[in-house]
Image (cartoon, rainbow, N blue to C red):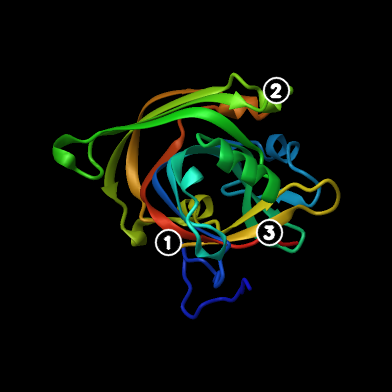
Amino acid sequence: MTVESVPAGAGPGECPFTVERPVMRQRWERLTFLHWAYEPAAVQALLPAGLEAETCAGAAWVSLVPFFMRVTTGRRGLGVPWASYFPETNVRTYVRDEQGRPGIWFFSLDAARFGAVATARTTYRLPYFWSAMRLDEDRPDGDAVAGTTTYTCRRRWPGPGGAASRADATSRVVVRPGEPIAPARLDDRDHFLTARFRLFSPVRSGAPRTARAWHLPWPLHSAELLDLDDALLTAAGLPAPAGEPLVHYSPGVDVRIGRPEA
């Protein structure tokens, strides 16, 4: 049973509930967050009924998030070696449902393991794509963070099925992670963009389904964007982003995923 409660002393960046019996445990690591401000109407036009684009500083926000996924256990505590570690990239925005619950809406998710893609499309009805992906790191002297990180993605399947599922969409992101950001230095926008613990997924009719994702507050670092060549945002039907993105980097967190629910 997944239990939602507000832990005593929960503060900014902290998850406001627990997931006591997760259907899956994952580790999300070596993440880069690229965030762009959008006109709220442009984002709202792409959302299903029952979800409203949340705004911060008068703007809706869309993020491109490449990272490395490790699935540590699946249902009944069993490992899933056929899909246990792979690069992933998602395009997401920030929403609230009719019950006032904040969360994430994914326009697309690309992953390098076909089995994981098929399972996520079936179980959570998420718009996953099977893609050729790499995460390459140039780390001087074995430093865990310093140096550069390069993420590449070329979509394979499914598609073509219109612009929103274009099979030839690609992405290349190169960043230089920086120093850790002290929690006291994180502002409301930082928390708005990263402290999200619920995802929404589409259904054929009615309100979107949801699932909870519990983890400790993100250990965020500054980061410098060195190169960006991306078509995933426009492949999702979004206008091309304007201006330079806000950039975060994180070494990662351990995550407990709850079962899909209404």
Q: Marks 1 and 3, how far apart in space?
A: 23 Å
Disc number for residue 28: none
Q: Is residue 181 above or below residue 238?
A: below
Q: Which of these two is toward me, 109 or 118?
A: 118
The residue lying at 67 percent from left, 43 percent from top is 121
Where the N terminus falls, by quadrant?
bottom right
Mark 1 burial class by Cα count in 10 Å: few <14, some 14-19, many 20+: some
Left/right of residue 99 with respect to residue 229 in the rendered view: right
Is there a contact, CB below 8 Å, between mark 3 and mark 2? no
Q: Is residue 187 visible?
A: yes
Is there a contact, CB below 8 Å, between mark 1 and mark 3? no
Q: Which residue is mark 1?
A: 217
Mark 2 burial class by Cα count in 10 Å: few <14, some 14-19, many 20+: some
Q: Which residue in the rendered view is the most extreme toward the left?
A: 141
Q: Is residue 169 above or below residue 7?
A: above
Q: Which residue in the rendered view is the most extreme toward the bottom?
A: 8
3 vs 2, front mark:
3
Amino acid bearing label 1: Pro
Q: Marks 2 and 1, how far apart in space?
A: 35 Å
Disc number for residue 163: 2
Q: Earlier in the sequence, mark 1 or mark 3?
A: 1
Q: Is residue 35 visible?
A: no
Q: Earlier in the sequence, mark 3 or mark 2?
A: 2
| Element assignment for label 1 | loop
Q: Marks 3 and 2, how far apart in space?
A: 28 Å
Amino acid bearing label 3: Pro
Q: Position of residue 223 (x, y in %)?
A: 33, 39
Left/right of residue 158 with respect to residue 150 in the rendered view: right
Q: Which residue is mark 3?
A: 260
Q: Earlier in the sequence, mark 2 or mark 1?
A: 2
Q: Position of residue 46 (x, y in %)?
A: 73, 37
1 vs 3, front mark:
3
